[in-house]
Amino acid sequence: MKYKKPIFIYSTIFKNYRYPRDHIFTTQRAFKTRNLLKSLGLLDGACGMEKAPRRATESEITRFHTPVYLRAVKEAAAGKRTDQRPVMGLGTSDCPIFKDMFAYAAWSCGATLTGAEMILAGDADIVFNPSGGFHHAQADRASGFCYFNDLVLSCLRFVDQGKKVLYLDLDAHHGDGVQNAFYRSDKVLMISLHESGKTLFPYSGFENEIGEGDGRGFTINIPMPVGTCDKSYLRAFENIVVPIIPAFKPDVFVLQLGMDALAGDALAHLELSNNAHAEIVARIMRYQKPILATGGGGYHVEHTIRSWALMWEIMCGRETDEELAMGLGGTLLQSTEWAGGLRDRTLATNDSFCREVDAAIDKTTRYLRHHIFPLHAMNRNDER
C-alpha cells in the first residue's frame, strides 16, 4: 500500500471559538499549527492537502452521548440553567459553561468524523485533525476540558462499517472516556500510554484495567511513572504495543496525539521529547494501514505546535536526514526558545532515576504480557 497524500482537517471557523480567557485550554493551537505548516511549505499540495470539515449533527453526537446530556450542553451554552449541570460535569473549573462550548465541540466532532468518512470512502489514508482528541468526555458527562468525544464517535463510525480499530492514545492523561466506551467490546483495541493515575487526572488507567466480557484483553493501559523519558517510554511501546498489533490485525489506526507528555508541560510530569512521538508515528506508518490522527492535550503551546508540525511532516514522508541532524532553525519556526528545528533536543537524563523508572515499567510490562498476550493467542514472551 502506498499512502495517498495526507489530509489536514481545518476551518477558519475554529478561530472564532474560545474557552474562557483564564482557561488553560486554547483552541488556537490548531490555527497556529496550520500557519507554521504553511510557512514551512508543508500544506502546499505537494506534501499534503487541507480539507474543510463539517459540523457533526445531533443525531451523530447521540450515537455515543445521551440525548439528555446533549440537550444539557446545548441549553447551558445558550445560557439556560438546569439542575442537571453539576452531575453532568458542566460548570466546573475544568469544563466551564461558555457560549461557544456546544458549537466548538460539535465542529471538533465533525472534523474527526470528516476524516473517518474520507478514509472509509477511500479518499484518504492519513488524516490529521488537530482540533480533535477529546478523550475524557463520557456518554453523559463532561470531563477534563472535553464536552463531546470525537474519538469514540469516529471509532464507532469505523466499527459500524465492519472495521477493526486499534486506538492508540499518547496523551499524558489516561483516555478514560474512550476506555469506558469500549470496555466490553472486542471491535476496538484501546491502548493508552499515560502518566500513572497515582499522580495525574483522571486517576485511572492502571494495568489491571483490561476490559470485561467480550472486551477482556482489548483494553491495554501502560501507566508511566513521574519523570519517564524517551528511552523508557519507547521500550514500553516496543515490548507491549508492537507485538500486539499483528496479533490484533487492525484495519485502521486511530491516534490521539496529545503533547502534554512533553517535558515542561504545565499539567503533567513526564519528561519526553517529541522524538518519542515521532518514532511511534513513523512506526505505525510502517504497517501500511489507514491512520486517523487527532490532537489532544498540550499546555505548553509552542512545544505542542512544533510537535504537531513534526508529526505532520512525518505523515507526509517529508522529514529528511539533514533535518534530523540540523533542524530548520528557530527564526523560521518563530521560536526564541529552541533553534533546532521541529525536533526537540535530546534531553539529559539521570541514569539512576531512569533505572528506577525502568524497574516500574518492567513490572507493568510483565503484568501485561502475563494477562493480555494469552488472550490474543500470544506467548507471554512473544516478540513479534
Image: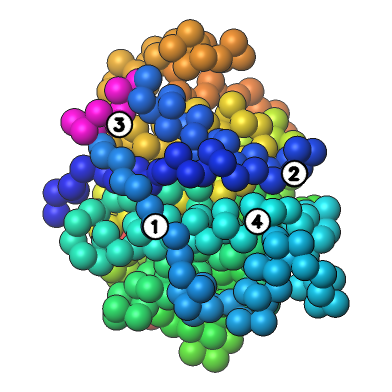
**Residue sitting at 14 percent across and 49 percent down?**
2
**Residue sitting at 69 percent across and 54 percent down?**
99
Query: Which circle's residue, 1 or 2, is located before the other in the chain?
Result: 2
**Marks 3 and 2, how far apart at CA:** 30 Å
Residue linked to disc 3: 43
**Marks 4 and 1, how far apart at CA:** 16 Å
> Is 42 a magenta residue?
yes
* Percent of width and height locating residue 363: 65, 60
User: How many residues crowd mark 2 within 10 Å: few (<14), some (14–19), many (20+)?
Assistant: some
Which quarter of the rendering shows the C terminus? bottom left
Query: Which circle's residue, 3 or 4, is located before the other in the chain?
Result: 3
Q: Which of 73 and 236 lies nearest the eye of the viewer?
A: 73
Query: Which circle's residue, 4 or 1, is located before the other in the chain?
Result: 1
Residue linked to disc 1: 54
| Type of the residue with mark 4 | Met
| Type of the residue with mark 1 | Arg
* Percent of width and height locating residue 336: 59, 10
